[in-house]
Amino acid sequence: MKEKILLSHGSGGRLSHQLIKELFLKKFDNSLLEKLGDSAIFEEKNIRWAFSTDSYVIKPLFFPGGDIGKLAVSGTINDLAVAGATPLFLSCALIIEEGLELSILEKIISSMKETATRANVQIITGDTKVVEHGSADGLFINTSGVGIVTTQENLSPQRIEVNDRIIINGTIGDHSIATLSKREEFDFQTEIKSDCAPLNDLIDKIIPACPGLKMMRDPTRGGLATVLNEVASEQSFAIELWEKKIPIRQEVASICEILGFDPLYLANEGKVIFIVKYQEVDKLLTIARAHPLGKESHIIGKVLSEPKGKVYLRTEFGSRRIIDVLTGDQLPRIC
């Protein structure tokens, strides 16, 4: 039987990485792509540029705290920002299903405009395609973005050292639970809203003040656990997370317990993970907590020497368990 693509191949988990390494990297082999960062970093005429692209197929199109338009703009801005770039320009490509109400499309486009304006980014090019009814689940959006890299040092796993600290700017899992609450197959009410937001203003304030910042990532698909596994994979260090310190809303934790989800793997759309030199932790936290998107920033772990290439959780009871990459995703179509 011929192998076929599964939903899990697009989840950001083990099957996604397998597809990327065994097909895309093999066919598109080049030095920029092989780094597999959130953005490709390249130099042209003595300027370091970042370039990123992402597609959004979230279900439903509207969710507490946002919509597919706000998500598409924020997501690409954040991929550029965590690479140390100042986002400048975006593209917007739409695949619209026949029958979508024009008023819905207008609302989404207005949301994209509002989000881009707030982040001081312009949408300067795009494309529109319409497909037959039943072919696109309403609307799919692709956004690509370019920005100028402002950091003096490359932000990469190779700069990470033992005793560096792991910081996140707020609670995890809000986006996945907010999205889930509006799906027809689930019947529960919640006050949780998605954390969907552009992070470039917060990051722009931290970068010049913290030269000891080693790396940033936004824990979207696959959540905190998957992203940190990507960081630690094949490196000469381990990452230890502290269960007591990871900020999770009680309502998110309760829903996860009922539905059997692990919040460490839930998607976030307004969170950034900072890996920073120990001596600059207080400075970074002070700056982050003074910003509306960083008020709940916490240290959630540190870098150790062993077991190399692994991520593990130090539980509230003092035990230790390895945090691995899931094969698929607990909740598909969340971005």
Image: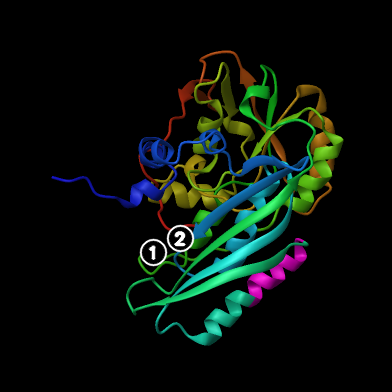
Identify the coloring.
Answer: rainbow
- Do the CB atoms of the residues marked 1 and 2 lie less than 8 Å apart? yes
Marker disc for residue 180:
2
Number of dots carrying numbers: 2
Which element carries disc 1, helix, strand or loop? Answer: loop
Bounds of the magenta span? 110-119
Q: Nearer the viewer, residue 193 or 201?
A: 201
Q: Quadrant of residue 208?
A: top right
Q: SS of the residue at dot 2?
A: helix
Q: At 58% from the left edge and 24% from the top edge, which residue is drawn?
A: 240
The residue pinned by badge 1 equals 186
Q: Which labelled disc corresponds to residue 6?
A: none
Left or right: residue 280 versus residue 251 is right
Answer yes or no: is residue 155 visible: yes
Q: Position of residue 296 (x, y in %)?
A: 72, 45
Main secondary-structure element of the magenta-colored stretch: helix
Q: Residue at x 40, y 84 (%)?
A: 99
Chain-order first, disc 1 or disc 2: 2
* Residue displayed at 59% across by 13% down: 305
Q: CA distance from mark 1 to mark 2?
A: 7 Å
How far from the left and from the top, in percent, is residue 100?
45, 82
Looking at numbered disc 2 in the image, what kind of residue is underneath it?
Leu
Amino acid type for the residue under numbered disc 1: Phe
- Residue 279 in the image: x percent, y percent? 81, 23
Above or below 278: residue 199: below
Question: Is 112 one of the magenta-colored residues?
Answer: yes
Report if residue 30 lies within the magenta region.
no
Q: Residues within 10 Å of mark 1 (few under 14, many from 20)?
A: few
Dot in front, 1 or 2: 2
